[in-house]
Image: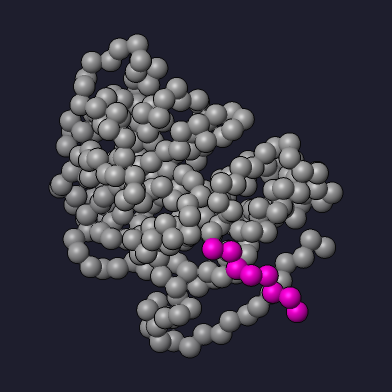
């Protein structure tokens, strides 16, 4: 039986999906069913978040090009079936966050993609990859919208941890790779170039003044949230996964199962 070679990344590098490229699928239910199942995997595999939100945009009218991209994702999963997050109880339970955006990434609508990653200690506990609802006129604006989304999630997580008895007294460090967005935060004077994002600016700045957030510049090469906004080259993709604490459970199952014996099963998916 022919077994396709596993793919190194969830989507091909520089992959740009179009709503008009390729023929319409005769049976779109297969495409919709698989993408819907992949959506559940994003709860434990943050590296699939960008892929799923990209493929989900074509659920209504999927085409052959979208199915080919989906098959590439499945080949990637075939080679990383045992990969997942290992929550480590090392270090203080402090939050830190990373926010990023891919400005005007959609070649048709020119909407940007927001991505944020929040860690508790060294373990990821919350992440998001989503296309922004409006078109950003600059990369700084797109970054600021991403920071605002991350700030809102951080505020909610602090309240949740407090209810669980985990007090978070230190400001949460939010890492951003845009110097322009950081300068907007430091400058409370809003002018015509930032008036249209004034709500996001005020919200993020208020959280800084309240002592909840501490904004820090981080070089793009070290931005963990980059895996949520674009397809990265294979070496960079795996480097970020290692920094996020992603491990291969199949190679060392005792890390999670405590040495309990387990069995595996194989299955195949067919359009029919």
Residue 70 located left or right of residue 199: right
**In-front residue for pair 133/77:** 77
**In-front residue for pair 179/24:** 179
Can residue 156 be seen in the rendering of this structure?
no
> Residue 37 lies in what quarter of the image?
bottom right
Which quarter of the image is occupied by the N terminus? bottom right
Across and down, in percent, residue 247 comes to 41, 70
Across and down, in percent, residue 28 comes to 77, 49
The answer to whether 55 is drawn above or below residue 6 in the figure is: above
Please name the predominant secondary structure of the magenta segment in the image. loop
The answer to whether 150 is drawn above or below residue 119 in the figure is: above
Residue 25 located left or right of residue 263: right
Across and down, in percent, residue 100 comes to 38, 41
Q: Is residue 174 magenta?
A: no
Q: Residue at x 72, y 48 (%)?
A: 65
Q: Residue at x 44, y 86 (%)?
A: 260
- Colouring scheme applied when the structure was drawn: one colour
Q: Residue at x 40, y 65 (%)?
A: 246
First to last magenta residue range: 1-8
**In-front residue for pair 185/126:** 185
**In-front residue for pair 142/172:** 142
> Residue 159 lies in what quarter of the image?
top left
Q: How many marks?
A: 0
- The residue sitting at the top extreme is 192
Q: Residue at x 39, y 36 (%)?
A: 146
Which quarter of the image is occupied by the C terminus? bottom right
Can residue 95 be seen in the rendering of this structure?
yes
Residue 82 located left or right of residue 27: left
Across and down, in percent, residue 46 comes to 46, 56
């Amino acid at each position: 039986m022919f077994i396709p070679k596993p793919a190194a990344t969830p989507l091909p590098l520089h992959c740009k999906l179009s709503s008009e490229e390729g023929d319409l699928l005769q049976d779109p239910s297969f495409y919709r069913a698989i993408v819907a199942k992949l959506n559940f995997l994003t709860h434990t595999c943050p590296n699939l978040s960008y892929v799923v939100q990209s493929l989900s945009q074509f659920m209504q009218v999927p085409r052959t090009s979208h199915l080919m991209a989906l098959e590439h994702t499945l080949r990637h999963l075939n080679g990383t079936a045992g990969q997942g997050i290992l929550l480590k109880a090392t270090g203080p339970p402090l939050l830190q966050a990373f926010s990023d955006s891919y400005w005007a990434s959609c070649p048709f609508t020119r909407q940007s993609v927001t991505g944020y990653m929040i860690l508790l200690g060294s373990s990821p506990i919350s992440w998001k990859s989503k296309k922004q609802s409006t078109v950003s006129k600059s990369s700084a604006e797109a970054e600021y919208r991403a920071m605002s989304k991350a700030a809102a999630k951080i505020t909610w997580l602090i309240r949740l941890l407090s209810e669980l008895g985990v007090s978070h007294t230190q400001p949460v460090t939010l890492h951003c790779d845009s110097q322009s967005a950081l300068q907007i935060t430091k400058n409370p004077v809003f002018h015509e170039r930032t008036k249209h994002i004034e709500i996001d600016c005020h919200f993020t700045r208020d959280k800084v003044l309240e002592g909840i957030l501490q904004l820090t510049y981080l070089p793009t090469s070290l931005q963990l949230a980059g895996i949520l906004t674009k397809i990265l080259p294979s070496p960079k993709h795996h480097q970020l996964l290692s920094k996020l604490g992603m491990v291969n459970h199949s190679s060392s199952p005792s890390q999670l199962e405590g040495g309990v014996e387990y069995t595996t099963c194989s299955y195949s998916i067919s359009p029919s």
